[in-house]
């Protein structure tokens, strides 16, 4: 590779997923400008390690970047608990507005710096909903069910509040776990059905809309701080470009994802969301009471919710 530094990026999605499309733009932006020095390589499908493992690889500098869901970042800094709060954002518009608030995000992005990594940008990952092998029309249908969650204590709590048993596991294990009836279902955006083929084994998807959880592109701090000012500027611009292209691809692919899932035989259910909200109504307050640093961020988000809701 002519003495070029190889930059390794890990993520858990397929190479058709918006995250990957965004990362290709990140790669191109950097290589177009600094291609004599850096060779960016993207590893999809948890090839370099799943969720928490991938974060640890970035932390130690074994790899340079990874895409991490905020649920999985929670054990590295509990500021990331904020995103796991069910029904935190009252609309997609509010969610996007909050994520675009760079000042607010800075405090979150830099929270893990002392442990070796930081967030450089966010990627849209839609709204999370339940899906299972049997229809979930109301929270009653979750009783006695075993549902997969991310490796996140808050998500475990949330799942239990909804009335199901929580089974934390890596994203890449979910398909087989459903197929082998180790779990009854999981919760995620619609892409899990199509891109990750979970719609082959779970035929009911319920729009309870409990979370909007972004994917974070995280980078090793030593690597980022070792860049010259000029290079760092290019990496920052590349990160912005990554988000722009990922979101464009997200919006495009969302239109077809649902149709595709229907063709796979998935039934979409539109429940009374208030029944689900009611189950977790005390959770936001409980989380804030147990983690004081969330309060200012939470208040800011409520302000945006109100502005958007009018
Ligand atoms: C989404 C997200 C992934 C995450 C996954 C999960 O698909 O894009 O980054 O790993 O959810 O539930 O683990």
Image (tube, helix red, strand yellow):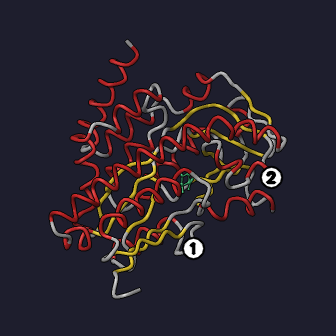
In-front residue for pair 258/239: 239
The N terminus, quarter of image = bottom left
Q: Of the residues tagged 2 and 1, which is closer to the observer?
A: 1
- For disc 2, the marked residue is 201
- For disc 1, the marked residue is 47
Name the residue: 30% across, 64% down.
33
The C terminus, quarter of image = top left
309 up-or-down from 182: above or below: above
**Location of residue 5 in the rendering, given as x and y in whole percent from the top left corner:** 34, 80
Label 1: element kind: loop
Label 2: element kind: loop
Name the residue: 41% across, 35% down.
284
Left or right of residue 201: residue 63 = left
Q: Earlier in the sequence, mark 2 or mark 1?
A: 1
Classify mark 2: residues with Cα within 10 Å, few (<14), some (14-19) or many (20+).
Answer: many
The tag on residue 166 is none
Q: Quadrant of residue 30?
A: bottom left
Left or right of residue 60: residue 106 = left
Name the residue: 48% across, 29% down.
281
Classify mark 1: residues with Cα within 10 Å, few (<14), some (14-19) or many (20+).
Answer: few
Q: Quadrant of residue 273?
A: top right
Q: Quadrant of residue 143?
A: top right
In-front residue for pair 33/130: 33
| Cβ at disc 1 under 8 Å from ligand 1 | no
**Location of residue 223 in the rendering, given as x and y in whole percent from the top left corner:** 26, 73
**Location of residue 9 in the rendering, given as x and y in whole percent from the top left corner:** 44, 68
Left or right of residue 259: residue 81 = left
Cα separation, mark 2 vs mark 1, equals 23 Å
**Location of residue 211 in the rendering, given as x and y in whole percent from the top left corner:** 51, 38
């Amino acid at each position: 590779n002519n003495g070029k530094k190889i930059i390794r990026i890990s993520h858990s999605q397929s190479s058709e997923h918006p995250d990957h499309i965004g990362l290709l733009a990140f790669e191109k932006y950097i290589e177009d400008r600094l291609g004599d020095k850096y060779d960016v390589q993207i590893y999809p499908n948890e090839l370099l390690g799943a969720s928490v493992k991938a974060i640890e690889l970035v932390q130690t500098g074994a790899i340079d970047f990874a895409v991490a869901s905020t649920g999985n970042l929670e054990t590295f800094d509990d500021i990331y608990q904020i995103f796991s709060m069910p029904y935190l954002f009252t609309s997609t518009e509010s969610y996007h507005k909050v994520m675009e608030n760079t000042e607010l995000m800075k405090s979150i992005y830099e929270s893990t710096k002392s442990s070796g990594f930081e967030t450089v940008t966010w990627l849209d990952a839609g709204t999370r909903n339940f899906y299972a092998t049997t229809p979930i029309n109301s929270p009653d249908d979750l009783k006695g069910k075993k549902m997969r969650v991310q490796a996140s204590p808050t998500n475990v709590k949330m799942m239990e509040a909804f009335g199901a048993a929580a089974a934390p596991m890596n994203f890449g294990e979910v398909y087989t776990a459903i197929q082998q009836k180790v779990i009854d279902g999981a919760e995620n955006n619609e892409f899990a059905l199509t891109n990750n083929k979970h719609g082959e084994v779970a035929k009911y998807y319920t729009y309870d809309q409990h979370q909007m959880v972004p994917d974070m592109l995280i980078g090793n701090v030593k690597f980022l701080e070792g860049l010259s000012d000029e290079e760092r500027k290019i990496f920052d611009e590349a990160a912005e470009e990554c988000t722009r292209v990922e979101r464009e691809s997200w919006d495009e692919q969302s239109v077809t994802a649902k149709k595709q899932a229907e063709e796979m035989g998935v039934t979409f259910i539109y429940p009374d969301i208030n029944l689900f909200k009611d189950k977790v109504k005390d959770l936001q307050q409980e989380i804030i009471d147990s983690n004081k640093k969330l309060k200012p961020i939470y208040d800011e988000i409520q302000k945006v919710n109100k502005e958007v809701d009018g």
